[in-house]
Structure formats: C-alpha cells, structure tokens
Image (tube, rainbow, N blue to C red):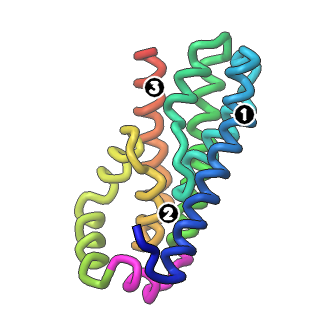
Amino acid sequence: MIIKNRAEITRIIIAVLLLSAAIVIASMTVGRDIYSGSRDEGMMSFAIVNACGYLFFLFMPVEVAFVYYLQGEINVLALNAVAIGTALFSQAIDYLIGLSVSNKFIDRLIGRRRYEKAEANIEKYGNLTIIVFNALPLSSPVISLAAGMLRLNIRNTLICTVIGLLIKYTALTLIF
C-alpha cells in the first residue's frame, strides 16, 4: 500500500487514534470489570462504554457489553434505562454534529446528487429508517448523523431513536 498524499496520512492517523481511544475506553471499563469479575457493580463502566459506542466515530460493541452486564446480578430495568439514556444522549450529539456541518462540506463528503437522493429516501422512509437502524445492531449513530445533516426534525428523530432503542434492548433482555 502506497500512501499518496497528506490527506491519506491524516486519515490513517485519525483512524489509529480513534481505534486507540476505543480500546482504552473499553479496557478501563468493561475490560477491568471482566478481569476482576465485578460486572454486578459495573453500571458506570457500562454507561461509559455505551455512551462512547453510540458516538458515530467510535465503533464499540455496545450490544455485547449490554448482554455481558445483563448476565450479572444487576437491576435489569436500571441497565435498560442506562442503555437507552446514554445511547440517546450520544445520538443527540451525533445529530448536532450533523446539523453543524455545512452544505458545502456535505457536497464534498457525499456529493450533491447522493445527498439529494438520500434526502428523498429519508424523507420518504425517514422515521421507519431511524427506528429500524436503532432496533438492529447496525450503524444507528451514523443515521443520527445523517438525520442532522439532512436537517430532519430533532424531536421526531429522537422519538424514533427511543422507539428503536426500546425495541432493541427489550428484545436483548428477553432473549438473554
């Protein structure tokens, strides 16, 4: 692999730093709880991992962490409340980041034609898209970012986010 320019070097450095941040966060929270066997007292660790995992630029296995803590002697309702609350908080941040991005940046990032196509699809299926992406272990933070970029109504976006998260975490609770 040949690195062609400064932009590629910058992207690689940013990717390495974000991956390192995710590893450090997971190691200092869930990882520490796993090694010490203290998942029953790890609500704060779970909250940190879940909040960070729902930020669009950090990829962390939040559903796996949820199931890990669900197996302990932790209050199931409290765990679900923390999961949904921290996910909603982080996705609101993702939405605001998307909202603050300029149209010029959007044009450079994805192109005007793709932007208009995405806007039409999200306007047509928007609420359902947000619910489905939050109900399944997919890139729901990216959907929140896109919703902000497309200037969707924040109230509707957050309501659909909560519905999807409720479906996901209720299903995980019932399955495990």
**Which tag is nearer the camera, tag 3 or tag 2?**
3
Q: Amino acid at mark 1?
A: Thr
Q: Position of residue 42 (x, y in %)?
A: 73, 25
Residue at 44% x, 80% y is 4
Q: Locate the N terminus and report the quarter of the image it occupies.
A: bottom left
Taking depth in this image into account, of 111 and 84 the one nearest to the observer is 111
The percent coordinates of residue 87 (x first, y second) are: 57, 44
Amino acid type assigned to the residue bearing label 3 in the image: Thr
Extent of the magenta region: 99-110
Whether residue 104 appears in magenta in the rendering, the answer is yes
**26 above or below 7?**
above
Residue type at tag 2: Ile
Q: Residues within 10 Å of mark 1 (few under 14, many from 20)?
A: some
Tell me which numbered mark, 3 or 2, is placed earlier along the sequence.
2
Q: Nearer the viewer, mark 1 or mark 2?
A: 1
Q: CA distance from mark 3 to mark 2?
A: 24 Å
According to the picture, the residue beneath numbered tag 3 turns out to be 170
Cβ atoms at labels 3 and 2 below 8 Å apart: no
Q: Disc 2 on helix, strand or loop?
A: helix
Q: Nearer the viewer, residue 154 or 53?
A: 53
First-in-chain label (1 vs 2): 1
Q: In this rendering, would 144 be left or right of 49?
A: left
Q: Residue at 72% of width from left, 14% of height from top?
A: 37
Residue at left 66%, top 32%?
46
**Residue 23: in magenta span:** no
Q: Which comes before the other along the chain, label 1 or label 3?
A: 1
Return the residue found at the far front.
2
Residue bearing mark 2: 154
Q: Residue at position x 48%, y 54% from top?
A: 141
Name the residue carrying label 1: 29
The image quadrant of residue 27 is top right
